[in-house]
Amino acid sequence: MTVNVVLGISGGIAAYKAPDLVRRLRERGADVQIVMTASAEEFVTSTALQAVSGRPIRSNLWDKEAEAAMSHIELARWADVVLIAPSTAEVMARIVSGGAPDLLTTICLATEAPIALAPAMNHVMWSNPATQANRQVLEERGIHILGPGIGSQACGETGSGRMLEPDVIAAQVVALIGGKGEGLLQGRKVVVTAGPTREAIDPVRYITNRSSGKMGYAMASAASTQGAEVTLVSGPVNLPEPPGVTVVQVESAEDMYTATHDAIGDTDIFIAAAAVADYRPAAVVQQKIKKNDEAMRLELVRCPDILASVAALDAAPFTVGFAAETENVTDYARGKLAKKKLDLIVANRVGRDCGFDRDDNAATVLWNNGEKQFPTASKTELAHDLLELIAEHFYAMRGSETQPKLTVISSND
Ligand code: PMT
């Protein structure tokens, strides 16, 4: 399947990766039309980009000859997806404001195709409230934000703001528009749980936890990128639905249990990244509880253990748990691996400054006779690496089946 990609390149140092990105997109069957901003030309030459894309580079809205061949409106219609990589803070702000001073932002206004941005900037610029507010508006409008990753930056500092690697971007963009047909989990069914659950106390109050759903959503996205048919059973979170993934929204642990078992059918791999409540109120009070007494007692009962129940099925899928621990992380995780009869467990430390509700995470994956550590990375990048290991173990367990080609991923410059 040929996919028409308008690749917008804006003026950041990560533009030097653009030729590699074009190559990765073309490997996946994309026809790539590059549109550069004026400042992008400071970082990468149009000669190089023309050579790798095989198409003349567009940059000027007022180029009569180019407009006569394919006008900016025709380009906007031609695109199956508009990808901007790297996307600077300035380009994000311009798209938010609806301004169209150049060819790239004009196409963004004129297209009905999905738009994806791969931000790249200094980590302080990325965490600036103005940039974060713009990111939120863009996501609310359905624009896909890919990354950014975490790591060393061109400015010599370290943090969140690195453009994702070209291979990761290319895989995500192709998955975004349903261009599957390749990848490590092609033809496989994957069910992922994510986010917290809410256990009602009365009609206005509930018990919950600090899970944002980011880790589980990243796992679902990564599995979809690898060609799997993915169902994501999600507790209440504020995240856009990952493209190409079937999302089932639930609230309580009971709801999540039911939705998971409804979805599990002939699933190949189950990944439990949700922070499911262990206990819920024994009874939900029907009217709002009044504060008449100085103290009150709440009786709690155990919630069903979704992960253990899936692992105990007669035809259980390859089952991957997560363990969120504040101390003795790997010891406790190994206990859960054995007790819940899992194939793999992803152990991560949680606390005020790690694990929950952050864009990054670190983990150790444990199995019966081994383990592997994954250092801190963005949840997007970590999820891709975890998926690679999960697929390796899944195919090893299935023995006779052939493992398809790896679609992933490099990490550092
Ligand atoms: O959502 P984020 O903000 O991105 O944070 C990510 C995360 C820290 C929530 C995630 O990485 C993680 O660790 N998820 C598992 C959280 C958890 O509930 O861990 P646990 O050690 O309490 O539970 C062990 C396993 O049993 C988990 O796979 C959990 O999904 C599962 N479980 C637990 C209780 C229950 N009633 N049913 C379950 O299925």
Image (tube, rainbow, N blue to C red):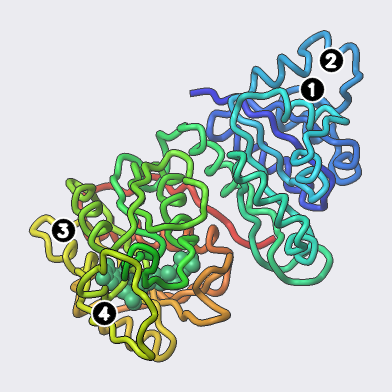
Percent across and percent down for residue 399 are: 21, 56
Q: Is residue 253 left or right of residue 217?
A: left
Percent across and percent down for residue 184 are: 39, 47
Disc 2 to disc 4, how far (Cα)? 62 Å
Disc 3 to disc 4, how far (Cα)? 17 Å
Specify the amino acid type for callout 4.
Answer: Lys
10 Å crowding of disc 2: few (<14), some (14-19), many (20+)? some
Q: Please state which of residues 8 and 207 is positioned toward the viewer in this rendering.
A: 207
Residue at x 35% of width, y 41% of height: 186
Q: Please state which of residues 15 and 327 is positioned toward the viewer in this rendering.
A: 327
Disc 1 to disc 4, how far (Cα)? 57 Å
Q: Closer to us: mark 1 or mark 4? A: 4
Q: Does dot 3 land on a helix, a strand or a loop?
A: loop
Q: Are marks 1 and 4 in contact (CB under 8 Å)?
A: no
Percent across and percent down for residue 152 are: 72, 68
Q: Answer whether residue 42 is visible to the viewer in this image.
A: yes
Q: Which residue is mark 1?
A: 56
In this view, 47 is above or below 227: above
Q: Earlier in the sequence, mark 2 or mark 4?
A: 2
Q: Earlier in the sequence, mark 1 or mark 3?
A: 1
Residue 292, quarter of picture:
bottom left
Q: Are marks 1 and 2 in contact (CB under 8 Å)?
A: yes
In this view, 233 is above or below 10: below
Task: State which image quarter holds ligand 1.
Answer: bottom left
Q: Does dot 4 land on a helix, a strand or a loop?
A: helix
Q: Does dot 2 land on a helix, a strand or a loop?
A: helix
Q: Would the CB of label 4 be found within 8 Å of ligand 1?
A: yes
Specify the amino acid type for callout 1.
Answer: Pro
Q: Earlier in the sequence, mark 2 or mark 3?
A: 2
Q: Which residue is mark 2?
A: 66
